[in-house]
Amino acid sequence: MAGRILLVEDDPGIATVIVTALEDERFEVDRVDGIARRDACLADKSYSVMLTDVVLTDGDGLSSLGEVRDAHPDMPVIVLSAQNTLDTAVRATELAAFEYFPKPFDLDELVRAVVQAAGQRGGEGSPVPDESGEGLPLVGRSRAMQGVYRMITRVLRNDLTVLVLGESGTGKELVAEAIHQLGHRKSGPFVAVNAAAIPHDLIESELFGHEKGAFTGAIAQAIGKFEQANGGTLFLDEIGDMPLEAQTRLLRALQSGRIRRVGGRQEIAVDVRIVAATNRDLAPMIAAGTFREDLFYRLNVVPIELPPLRERRDDIAALARHFLGLAVGEGLPRRRIDTGAVAALERFPWRGNVRELRNAVFRLALIARDETIDAETVEMVLGSPDVAAEVDGDTGFAGALEAWLRVSPPREGQLYDDALAEFERPLLSHALASTGGNQLRAARLLGINRNTLRKRLTDLQIDPDDCTRRD
Ligand SMILES: Nc1ncnc2c1ncn2[C@@H]1O[C@H](COP(=O)(O)OP(=O)(O)OP(=O)(O)O)[C@@H](O)[C@H]1O
């Protein structure tokens, strides 16, 4: 049995259709037509999910939903209603209903939501099931991930633009794939484009395509990612790395639903669902003028934030076992992991998040001497988790560089100069401040020629007087 469902529905026709569909999915369904019988059932048995209509023979199904939720906080509730008013939807959502289905609804979608809700409640398998009911490779049942799954379910039946946020390696691309595979566009293409991996001058042609002869090297017409994704989902990864001109064209395409190939005249209508992702903090980039605010609002319709792995350590055990399974598929020896090893893995900082954990587990599977990986093996292969955590706290220059890169997208061909200038500016200011503005002494302290210092101050537009005043 996939789970026990309580259906509160007074329309016998609708009830029969729902019961049959759920029984086909191996659910056991108790059907009642009013609030009194509902409460009797809830007092008697435990249910995986409750489905309820709003207008019932003996009252308003929503009015007492609050008490039901308080008495059964783990039971997801799906509200079905013919009253397709915003008010009903808002009331249902305020009562923390798992999903709200306005009638008439698509039966397949309802069944899928029930399967999903039953899975979230703690049944076996992944909380985000795919069409066949098999789990998608999104592992983890931490509270933080439950919030992510909940958001995913909210966007499956619509085309709202989703912005997936989170550090590198947290699973943003996996979330985009899940939205596509579980959503109503699943029969269409899923096309991913990584703005950080494409040279800046080619991004527009990559996204929108180009006509023959549009630029040197455009020897034939090319179809861009937007057109390739027509009818499906376009995943715009590392959106924070997109140059400003391309951002402008992207915004225009999103606003109009039409694109124009580079060098082309014709506007082409495209029907794509956009899921964008970034590991950058876009707010300071917007403030610095490197990311368009209007594009941000256009993309940030439904933000889904993936927490870093260190904030959901209770997922590490399940992820480690999942990756040991994948390792076998990659031809590595079959291994098990004991609780001591899991406890050790839970203490690492995992700056590289799930990706880093996956690589570490693969390494463990490869190098471990015994069939069972224990804490000692973890330490031998990956080093001490406590030392790693300590080093991690002391981020030093590397940490500062990372923080700076997060807000300043590298300018093609300029990164070295930009980063050195960024570092040199406070260094020269510090040297001047600590020598009371005396350039000769500052040059000696730095170990550089006085003329060099003067030239660098001019190049970097540093006023020596400012440095002494500030100190
Ligand atoms: N919840 C998860 N369950 C199983 N595997 C996961 C999960 N999250 C991430 N992974 C795996 O970790 C790796 C990194 O995930 P993914 O590429 O989706 O991260 P990302 O956030 O898009 O990274 P980046 O920002 O660097 O592009 C992939 O191999 C992915 O399959």
Image: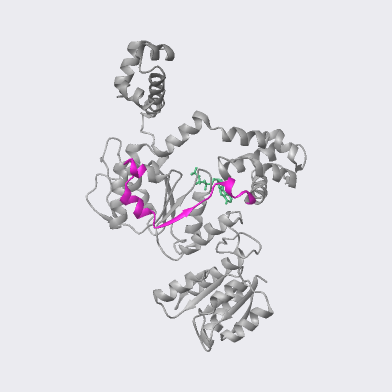
Residue 377 horizontal/vertical position (percent): 73, 37
Q: Is residue 469 above or below residue 169?
A: above
- The reply, left or right, for residue 226 in relation to residue 103 is left
Residue in the foreground of this view, choosing between 71 and 346: 71
Query: Can residue 338 be seen from the camera position used here?
Result: no
Q: Is residue 308 magenta?
A: yes
Q: Is residue 119 magenta?
A: no
Residue in the foreground of this view, choosing between 207 and 281: 281
Specify the color scheme.
one colour
In the picture, the quarter occupied by the C terminus is top left
Residue positioned most to the bottom: 57
In the picture, the quarter occupied by the N terminus is bottom right
Residue 34 horizontal/vertical position (percent): 56, 86
- The reply, left or right, for residue 326 in relation to residue 444 is right
Residue in the foreground of this view, choosing between 4 and 133: 4
Query: Can residue 387 be seen from the camera position used here?
Result: yes
Q: Residue at x 75, y 41 (%)?
A: 374
Q: Is residue 343 above or below residue 103?
A: above
Residue positioned most to the left: 265
Residue 188 horizontal/vertical position (percent): 43, 59
Q: Which residues are magenta?
A: 285-314
- The reply, left or right, for residue 78 in relation to residue 333 is left
Q: How many marks?
A: 0
Residue 156 horizontal/vertical position (percent): 47, 63
Residue in the foreground of this view, choosing between 399 and 128: 399
Q: Quadrant of residue 432?
A: top left
Q: Quadrant of residue 373?
A: top right
